């Protein structure tokens, strides 16, 4: 997602809804730009437009975003290529597998993984007694709250 989409989504998560004029002021965009952002978020089933308001949708996708919003900084988590990397994360995936699946550069993958590690979403696992001390990234176990 781009920064404007994330900022709008974060505001909607925070308040449940936001009116169009407040959204325009928040993002510093014109009406046609806001409509494009809302259209994208609507197509991805995160929000719905209701008269003058932009509301969080009642969908699985929106509930997942809301759960992420409560625990993590979604602007860091889902910005640009980070979203693509996290979509391919599975327990014990290595860098080469991520590069192959996402077709992103090694530097981009490492940058995304660093953000995820800082947020506590993943942890680095170094496998010793292997030819190259393989580094794997595993999803961090969620603690019971």
Image (spheres, grey):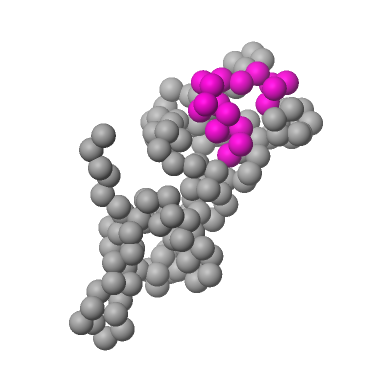
Q: Is residue 133 left or right of residue 53?
A: left
Residue 45: x, y in percent?
A: 49, 31
Extreme residue toward the right, this view: 30
Residue 103: x, y in percent?
A: 50, 66
Q: Which residues are magenta?
A: 6-23
Using the image as rendered, state which of residue 88 and residue 72 is in the foreground: 72
Q: Is residue 11 left or right of residue 65?
A: right
> Considering the image in quadrants, where does the C terminus appear?
top left
Residue 120 in sight from this viewpoint: yes
129 is higher (above) or lower (below) than 63: below
Using the image as rendered, state which of residue 68 and residue 49 is in the foreground: 68
Residue at the (58%, 29%) spot, across then down: 11
Residue at the (45%, 35%) spot, across then down: 69
54 is higher (above) or lower (below) than 144: above
Residue at the (56%, 33%) spot, across then down: 9
127 is higher (above) or lower (below) than 132: above
């Amino acid at each position: 997602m781009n920064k404007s989409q994330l900022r709008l989504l974060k505001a909607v998560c925070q308040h449940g809804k936001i009116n169009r004029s407040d959204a325009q002021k928040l993002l510093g965009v014109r009406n046609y730009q806001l409509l494009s952002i809302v259209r994208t978020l609507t197509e991805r089933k995160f929000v719905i437009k209701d008269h003058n308001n932009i509301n969080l949708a009642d969908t699985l996708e929106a509930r997942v975003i809301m759960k992420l919003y409560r625990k993590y900084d979604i602007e860091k988590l889902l910005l640009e290529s980070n979203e693509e990397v996290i979509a391919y994360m599975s327990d014990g995936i290595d860098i080469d597998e991520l590069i192959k699946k996402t077709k992103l550069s090694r530097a981009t993958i490492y940058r995304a993984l660093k953000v995820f590690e800082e947020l506590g979403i993943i942890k680095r696992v170094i496998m010793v007694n292997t030819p190259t001390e393989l580094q794997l990234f595993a999803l961090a176990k969620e603690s019971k709250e």
